[in-house]
Amino acid sequence: MKMPVRLVPAMVAAIVVVAAAGDRAALGQLSATDEERLQILSDPEAAKAKAKDEKAKPPFELFRSQFAPFDVLPFLKPWSWSTVTLEVRANDVDYEGGLQFQPIALPGMPQEVVYARDARLPKEQRSRLNLQVLVPHRAGVKLPKELAAELIRPGAIRADDAWTVPMKLIPPTQMLVVVMSKESSGQYAAWNRYPCFVPSSADPADAIAVDLARYYRLVLPEHADKPFLSPHPLTWGPISHVIWDGLPPDSVAVSHQQAMLDWLHWGGQLVLIGGAGPAFSIFRDSFLQPYLPADPSGDDALLGEAELRPLSEAYPPGATPPPPPQEGEEPAPPPPKLEKLPDGRPYRPPVAIRPPAKRPVLLSGLRPRPGASKIPLGPGSSRLLAAEARVGRGRITMLALNPTEPTLAAWPGIDTMIRRVVLRRPEEPLADRSGLNPQDLAPPPRGQLDAVDLSWYRIASRDHGGPVQAEADRVRAAELAKAQVGGPPRSISRTPSEAAELAASPTNTEAEEAAMARPGVAEWRDAAPIPRLCRDALEKASGITVPGSAFVLKVIFAYILAIVPLNWLVFRLLLGRREWAWATIPVLALGFAFVVERMAAYDMGYDSACDELDLMEVQAGYPRAHLSRFASLYTTGRARYTVAYPDDPAALALPFNNQRSIGGEETTTAAFRCYPVPALEDYAVQPRSLSMYRAEQYLDLPSSSGLEASPSGGRTLTNGTGLELRDAVLVEDGPDGPIESYVGTIGPNATIELDGGRPPAAVPEAVEGFDGPDPSPLMGVLRKASPDRGPENAGEMRLVAWSPGPRDGQSFEPALDRHRGTTIVLVHLRRGPPPPPDGRRYNLLADAARRRVPEAPAAATDPPARRSRR
């Protein structure tokens, strides 16, 4: 039988398909070339269309940018490190180069920094590239709205491609609350409308002002079961709380687990939500298991109106109406009628909780572990609303109820419960008590809380000594304060570059300036107390001083003597060629300069050197430490250095402001490369001057340090830092102030008795035996009580000591002639229990004797003047 001609192509295609299928079974799959040939044979028109589309694609594509922990919103805080993720694809060939942001100026310094990393992009595959960035803000300068990113090969003059990444700075006082839920996190969206999230003084009609003044910003993941967290522990500072609602711990990556534990120990607050379902059993054998304050008891209870009455009485609704709903949200129910209020009491009468008859509220049963704090359901109730425990500086709270339960979400008192129990946010201070009127039904005006009231997260090298503002920020804040009371504004002196930047862009609104000028917590500011002390110690240890007037006069006299009388006498009397004296003047000048330079180098004893002062902060029972490095680089000639951290992929480093810049000084550019090896690259060091840098990282310790009870009834102290701790001083909170006890030297991994058998010794005013910067001033400041004396710090005990030498883990290129330093060790040995939510700082109704004239929480919690007892 003869086959029709028109069927020949179809038969050929079928044979090719069958052969391809056989080859795929034998070899696993077709190559890209074979698939393309098959498509050309079977569907040539589709192959042509695909080739045309491929040709139209650009060489590189940027699909999205993300700022952790936000999925979509491009928010980040100034003076805080953030992780930025760019999703990029190379369409033509495999690409090997670098991804970097264009230079960002560091305020107060003739210095710019480029944030960069290596970029390896396989062809036609989407790659997610993470970078750590810090964006500062200068008072009066227009807030940036984008970052310029580019792909560039090493040594190339021009970038291969460039994009603009949108961004928005949020105020430093605005903290982030991250929701981690196994289901839709939209049920938490209503929290943004709760009064506890915004100041009561904010005008609800002005949505922009409310957004700028907001205390907390809720972070709702785009995919509920995949929260977009940062693997870098030092970028978790803007997060004050994490709400964990049923998400399996195994779904969190190991790097995120470690970052969360570091964040917890340095002041993070983690709230685990109970209620229906296996809310707490999922944490069994998880990374959080050793830190949980309670275990599931199995005796869950269904609560009706009568059983919930203690809860409703303990948390009456506030008098502040909720803010207007945001776009896409339903309006909140109208608040109950405002009744007569006592002086300054911002509450309405309690409102009963009425669950439907067939839908009672489920209360998870909890069995508190030893040492855990218990929060009852309400006065007179034997049931537990929550159990909580300290984890380092932070806390973990297990909430037995689910606050998103429809019955509880509709209850007007839910805002008060979330503020006190979940957020542990203090009451706002009274703005003015002079006009209090018991007959007035309106609540009295109240002031705005600061960042130190909203978050417990602190890092000693950044926060010890209290919050700090740059000088320009303080001036701008004073300007705004005067403008608000009708006073004349003051002018700000600015550098020419700042003035040009202001002239090229419109200014911010007064609301934006006021919000951005307020200090935050855990900010990377070189003007903070600890960095200032370290800068002074490094300058003193360097030995570099400005030459005195006598030395300058001697050099000038010697130069004049050599170039005029001696030069003329040699050529006039000895050689008889006095005209040659003019020709030798340039040679004498250069030779004289070379000799002076060599003499100065000989006096220093080295050509390049680094002095370093490290602060290592340790939390009791945790085998990791936070290390802050402050260092100065010196060289006799002009050089560019690379300071790398090959053993720690999470290290951060930036130039450190030495406060010695002068107007018109040339601006230099350095680069911080976060991957594959964190490094501060191309850092310029000028001859005969100090260039400083600072770095931070987390270190793994040999074991944990802690304070335990000894068999003899006393206390034993274990040193798990692996260092020899010298001149150790134990500092305890006492009724009249910090009590200092001199301990002396503690060997590496040693355990010593603290009580009994040890005669008291005076704390030395200065230490001896160190090589490099003097640790005495910094140790003295760390022994004093910090101005941040909130109730979460009550009962603290810490150990302050020093160890010779800087910490290992750095490399320098080019190599240094001398590297010396000192390490100060701060060990937090004990902290008091979490402050109860019914204390006066969180509940103005707690003290009945003071209801008539309530005081501001700040005044009530400020400690009296304290003195050290030695």
Image (cartoon, grey):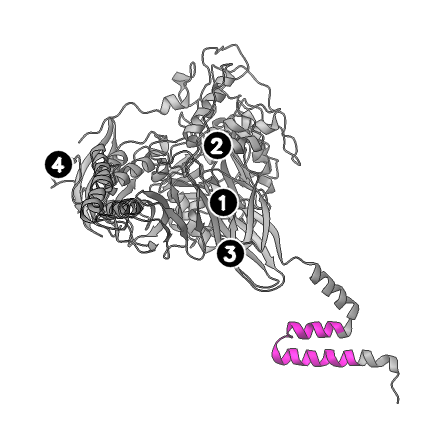
- Where is the N terminus found, in terms of image quarters? bottom right
- Residue 98 bears which disc, if any? 3
Question: Magenta stretch containing residue 647, yes or no?
Answer: no
Q: CA distance from mark 3 to mark 4?
A: 59 Å
Mark 2 residue crowding within 10 angstroms, few (<14) / some (14–19) / many (20+) = few
Q: Decide which of tag 1 and tag 2 comes sooner along the chain.
A: 1
Distance (Cα) linking label 4 and label 1: 56 Å
Of callouts 4 and 2, the N-terminal one: 2
Question: Which residue: 36% across, 44% down?
Answer: 694
- Residue at the extreme bottom of the image, as rendered: 1
What number is the disc on residue 496?
Answer: 2
The disc labelled 3 sits on which kind of residue? Gly
Check disc 3 and report its element: helix, strand or loop.
Answer: strand
Disc 2 residue type (three-letter): Pro
- Cα separation, mark 4 vs mark 2, equals 59 Å
For mark 1, what is the residue?
103
Residue 281 visible in the shown view: yes
Q: Specify start and end residues of the magenta stretch as a single range.
A: 12-40
x and y, in percent, of residue 261 in the image: 40, 48
Against 133, residue 217 (above or below) is: above
Q: Earlier in the sequence, mark 3 or mark 1?
A: 3
Which SS class for mark 4? Answer: loop
Alpha-carbon distance for marks 2 and 3? 33 Å
Q: Judging from the image, what secondary structure is the residue with disc 1 in?
A: loop
4 or 1: mark nearer the eye: 1
Contact between labelled residues 2 and 4, with CB atoms less than 8 Å apart:
no
Along the line of sight, which residue is nearer the eye, 617 or 633?
633
